[in-house]
Image (cartoon, rainbow, N blue to C red):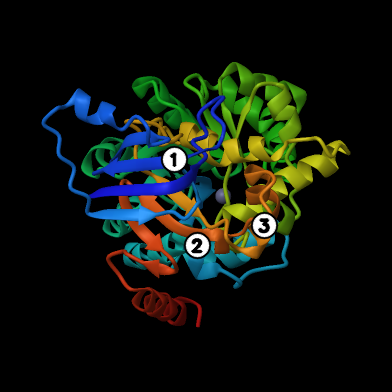
Amino acid sequence: MNIRLYNARILSMKEGQDIFAGEIWVKNDRILYIGDGSDTDQIYQKSPNTCIVWDREIDCKGNLLMPGFKNAHTHSGMTLMRSYADDQPLADWLNQMIFPVEAKMNGEDIYHLSKLAILEYLTSGITAVFDMYLTPESIADAFDDMGMRCVQVGGVNDFSQSPELVEEMYLKLNKKYPLQSYVLGFHAEYTCQKGLLEQIAAFSHKYKAPVFTHLAETESEVAGCVERYGMTPVAFLDSIGMFDYGGGGYHCVHVTEEDIEIMKKRGMFAVTNPSSNLKLASGVAPVSNFLENGVKVAIGTDGPASNNCLDMFREMFLVTGLAKVKQKDAQAVDAFEVLKMATVNGALAMGLKEADILAQGKLADLIMIDLNQPNMQPIHNIPKNIVYSGSKQNVIMTMVNGKILYENGTFYVSDSPENIYRKAEQIKQRIIK
Ligand SMILES: [Zn+2]
């Protein structure tokens, strides 16, 4: 498909580039041209025989094109447990409500439940997710069938999956599907015995690859690790070589100054999940401290059982709002910094170096934000409008890999919403009743 998006405002997220009026040309999966439209001759000069026949030319009517959001931590298949287990402490929530349901879920269930999550991602302008869940192959099938980009991360622990499966999926899923990839990882320190963790660290050394995991989410998790190993989770995992090739942690709420030093030294990402941390009363991540110490921060929704929605706008507002309250400083973590976390940093954490910004040759993973709605007017400062007053209702187009998957409230994917909702309801009836 060749798509020309003209009469747009463009927020490329390229370092030092301000919002400008212009157009974007998409050829197949890539951005062929981005600019103010005055220099499109260069495309033809570079390849004189080029003749572009547009499949679509879209008048953006002054609305904003920007890189799609990267949801840097989620568990898509947990849509089954949305609003099923709420208002409980994390340990009870996980052990008494979530794990028993998960024990009854199969790969086919997770295939359909992931599709439900994908619909929600698209409405929120999310063009790629960093997903950790139970059945990697059926998850990859769901994302592949829907045309959605997904980076999976190993979620092994003592009672589900195995280190061997993590290695097998690492080798298989990075080859099999164009829009899918797989990163080494494990569920969390507190759900894995030391031997298992050492196996994951060994894979990281074998493949010179980063490792991601739930990290320092709760006070009790940190206390348990200190009791077991005499070190915080960050320090303990680092001591067994887990982060020698980088990686990162999801949540990173209860970290010490020494932990932040280690994260900086290892080039680790802190993926913050503010809604989940609030709802499960885990605490507020020290986002300002990460930034001051040069630790890159990305943003994730976490799963729909602990959030309960998959909405990057809500997360973005909470990231800055909570940082301001925690620091008692209204200047803390400004809106543009938050947008960078939600786009560029997320892409870098997920290994999507081709989908971080809008630039010639980059992947066409982009969204259109409707500025012609009451909550976006008048226009003083678009990044602040998006983070402080924006919502998913402003997302009027979501394009992944050069294909429009969602436009003006309609999904252009391989399955109908009605069918996906019906499947989710059937799974609920069978497993939960
Ligand atoms: Zn999680």
Is 3 displayed left or right of 290 in the figure? left
Q: Position of residue 144 (x, y in %)?
A: 28, 53
> Which quadrant would residue 98 be assigned to in this image?
bottom right
Per the rendering, the mark at residue 78 is 2
Cα separation between marks 3 and 1: 20 Å
Within 8 Å: ligand 1 and the Cβ of disc 3? no
- Name the secondary structure under disc 2: helix
Residue 363 lies, with reference to residue 232, above or below; the image says below
Residue under the point 72% across and 67% down? 87
Residue under the point 56% across and 21% down? 267
Is 29 displayed left or right of 62 in the figure? left
Amino acid tagged 1: Gly
Residue under the point 39% across and 44% down? 365
Q: Are marks 3 and 2 in contact (CB under 8 Å)?
A: no
- Name the secondary structure under disc 3: loop
Residue under the point 41% across and 76% down? 421
Residue 281 lies, with reference to residue 289, above or below; the image says below
Per the rendering, the mark at residue 93 is none
Cα separation between marks 2 and 1: 40 Å
Question: Sequence order check: which comes first, mark 3 or mark 1?
Answer: 1
Per the rendering, the mark at residue 22 is 1
Badge 3: residue crowd in 10 Å (few <14, some 14–19, many ≥20): few
Per the rendering, the mark at residue 377 is 3
Q: Position of residue 227 (x, y in %)?
A: 73, 34
Amino acid tagged 2: Met
Question: Sequence order check: which comes first, mark 2 or mark 1?
Answer: 1
**Residue 14 appears in the rendering:** yes
